[in-house]
Amino acid sequence: MDFVKKSDVVILDFTAAWCGPCKAQGIILKDVSEEVSPPVLIGKVDVDAPENRNLVSTLKIDAMPTMVFFVSGHIVAFRGKESGGG
């Protein structure tokens, strides 16, 4: 998870192409990331992509949309619909 070390504040947005609420959330996150200071780095994680299966499993992501918040490389919060990761 080198991505979460690229900025002091990182949000991983767990999403899927078929998830309507994920699309709406993505637009909001993009707007927020451009307006806040210090900068927030947002990464999208497609839960259906084979290369993301280990990360999804490790963080126990079982519902979308789910966001995982990192500060200085450490998980500080999970937000999602009944996510098992908290």
Image (cartoon, helix red, strand yellow):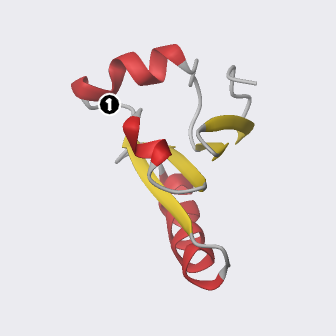
Q: Is residue 15 above or below residue 23?
A: above
Nearer to us in this view, 25 or 40: 40
Which residue sits at x=51%, y=57%? 7
Residue type pointed to by label 1: Asp
Task: Report x, y in % for residue 67.
Answer: 62, 44
Q: Quadrant of the C terminus?
A: top right
Task: Report x, y in % for residue 64.
Answer: 56, 38
Nearer to us in this view, 3 or 30: 3
Q: Quadrant of the N terminus?
A: top left
Which residue sits at x=57%, y=55%? 21
Which residue sits at x=69%, y=20%? 84
Q: Is residue 73 above or below residue 6?
A: above
Q: Quadrant of residue 61?
A: top right
Residue of label 1: 48
Task: Report x, y in % for residue 75.
Answer: 67, 34
Say few, some or many: other residues with alpha carbon within 10 Å of mark 1 (under 14 / 14 to 19 / 20 or more): some
Nearer to us in this view, 18 or 10: 10
Q: Is residue 60 above or below residue 5?
A: above
Tag 1 secondary structure: loop
Which residue sits at x=65%, y=35%? 74
Left or right of 2 on screen, residue 28: right
